[in-house]
Image (tube, helix red, strand yellow):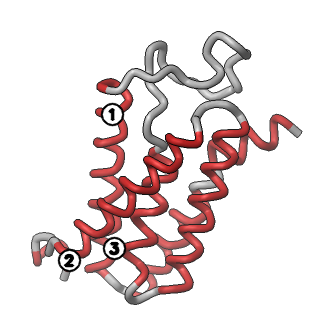
């Protein structure tokens, strides 16, 4: 059972990302697709920076074996990039694709809980990821990407 939880905590994010990507390609919603791609990039950059700048040890460090996820030594836990990514997508999709947005929020919460269960994040990391994701999503809505990329 633990192996299944670890697997889902690592890879469950792929289902909504792939599904939304295919859906937006089929719908030819290039503007939203561009905002989604840019927000994923921004969230990942912010996540990498925060994990170095805020060196909070992962919950498993010193109390349990590595849960089966490769994490560089000294790599902090704050904030959850998985959760932030899905929440940013949810915010971006909310106006035009409400059902997909709620799916992203649900997957974001589920992935966050799974990552707490396997001890790679604290609950505050998940909450922080959700907040960062919402802020990045709101920023993506307000910014108009280069028109040639979006049209």
The answer to whether residue 65 is above or below residue 48 is above
How far apart in space, not on screen, are marks 3 and 1 (Cα)? Answer: 26 Å
Are there few (<14), some (14-19), or many (20+) residues within 10 Å of tag 1? some
> Residue 107 sits in which quadrant?
bottom right
Q: Which residue is mark 3?
A: 33
Q: Which residue is mark 1?
A: 50
User: Is 18 on the left or on the right of 56, as rendered?
Assistant: right
Are there few (<14), some (14-19), or many (20+) residues within 10 Å of tag 2? some
Could you tell which of marks 3 and 2 lies nearer the N-terminus? 3
Q: Which residue is mark 2?
A: 150
The answer to whether residue 138 is above or below residue 133 is below
Quadrant in the picture for the C terminus: bottom left
Q: Residue furthest right?
A: 1
Q: Nearer the viewer, residue 17 or 102?
A: 102
> Residue 96 sits in which quadrant?
bottom left
**Residue 68 appears at what percent x and percent y?**
69, 26
How far apart in space, not on screen, are marks 3 and 2 (Cα)? Answer: 8 Å
């Amino acid at each position: 059972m633990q192996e299944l939880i670890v697997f889902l905590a690592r890879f469950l994010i792929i289902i909504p990302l792939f599904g939304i990507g295919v859906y937006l390609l089929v719908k030819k919603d290039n503007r939203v697709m561009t905002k989604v791609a840019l927000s994923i990039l921004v969230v990942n950059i912010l996540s990498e920076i925060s994990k170095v700048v805020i060196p909070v040890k992962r919950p498993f460090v010193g109390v349990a074996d590595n849960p089966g996820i490769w994490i560089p030594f000294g790599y902090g836990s704050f904030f959850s990039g998985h959760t932030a990514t899905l929440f940013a997508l949810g915010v971006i999709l909310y106006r035009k694709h409400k059902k997909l947005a709620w799916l992203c929020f649900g997957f974001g919460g589920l992935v966050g809980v799974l990552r707490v269960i396997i001890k790679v994040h604290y609950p505050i990391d998940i909450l922080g990821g959700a907040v960062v994701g919402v802020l990045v999503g709101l920023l993506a809505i307000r910014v108009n990407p280069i028109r040639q990329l979006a049209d």
